[in-house]
Amino acid sequence: MQVLQLEATPRTMVGGGAGRQARANKRVPAILYGFQVEKPIALTVDEHTFEKGLRRLAGDNVLIDLSIKGHPGTSRVFLREVQRDPLSGKMIHVDFLKIDESQKMHFSVPIHTVGVSTGVKLGGILDHILRTLEIRCLAKDLPSHIDVDVTEMDINNSLNVSDLNIPEGVEVLNPPNLVVVKVMMARLSGAMAEPTEAGEGEEESKEPEVIGEKKKEGEGEAEPKGKDSKEKKEKK
């Protein structure tokens, strides 16, 4: 898995005013906590550099080698949370979690489908049911995603968690019989299905004759009214 290299600057001022000032200078307020961090450390990172790095990685789990000005070495951290402005989408605040690289951690990784299934080529629909996989592993073994090859899947076929190709060192926490993807027969909507149903048998195609018989019955019921009017004319 790729690791983002990022430099941060310590900040002594905290609070809403300090955060707004940092963002005005194209810096994003951040905080570092976690393994061997006795007290959370307030930081800022360059907005442009950080956004560019996140777009390049394009993953749900981001590992960072974080260096802090004035501090020796780097810290392997996990991007815990990114708060964004709901209107502009710009970053407001970032949380970094320093991790113990000797201990396994719980992660959620996305599941990506690869290829076009045989069933879809025949008109079926691929239903991607499970989109994230719960795993436990060391940070160095964390995959950016899990691929599932659907090329050989025919209609009514399915693949479970137990069918996934899991990298070495990764422990899956989901039940093995949980369905990940399946290919279903396409179902027509009501308006489109009616012509298909009508063409399945000759008996259904004779339905207009039944409608015609109903009209004849209606005509028969109307005859007494005609007789009554004729009798009234004769009496006159």
Image: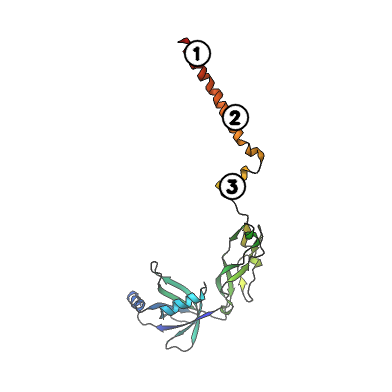
Quick check: 38 above or below 87?
below
**Quarter of the figure with the C terminus:** top left
Look at mark 1 in the image and give the residue it sits on: 231
Q: Are marks 3 and 2 in contact (CB under 8 Å)?
A: no
Q: Secondary structure at mark 3?
A: helix
Label 1 Cα neighbours within 10 Å, binned few <14 / some 14-19 / many ≥20:
few
Residue 41, picture quadrant = bottom left
Query: Percent x, y for residue 161?
Result: 63, 66
Under mark 2, the amino acid is Glu
Residue 117, picture quadrant = bottom right
The structure residue drawn at horizontal position 63% and vertical position 60%, both measured from the top left corner, is 121
The foreground one among 234 and 145 is 234
Q: Secondary structure at mark 1?
A: helix
Quick check: 233 above or below 190?
above
Q: Residue furthest top?
A: 235
Query: Percent x, y for residue 65?
Result: 50, 82
Q: Secondary structure at mark 2?
A: helix
Quick check: 56 above or below 113?
below
Query: Percent x, y for residue 195?
Result: 59, 45
Q: Earlier in the sequence, mark 3 or mark 1?
A: 3
Q: Which mark is residue 101?
A: none
Look at mark 3 in the image and give the residue it sits on: 193
Q: Which mark is residue 213?
A: 2
Under mark 3, the amino acid is Ala
Under mark 1, the amino acid is Glu
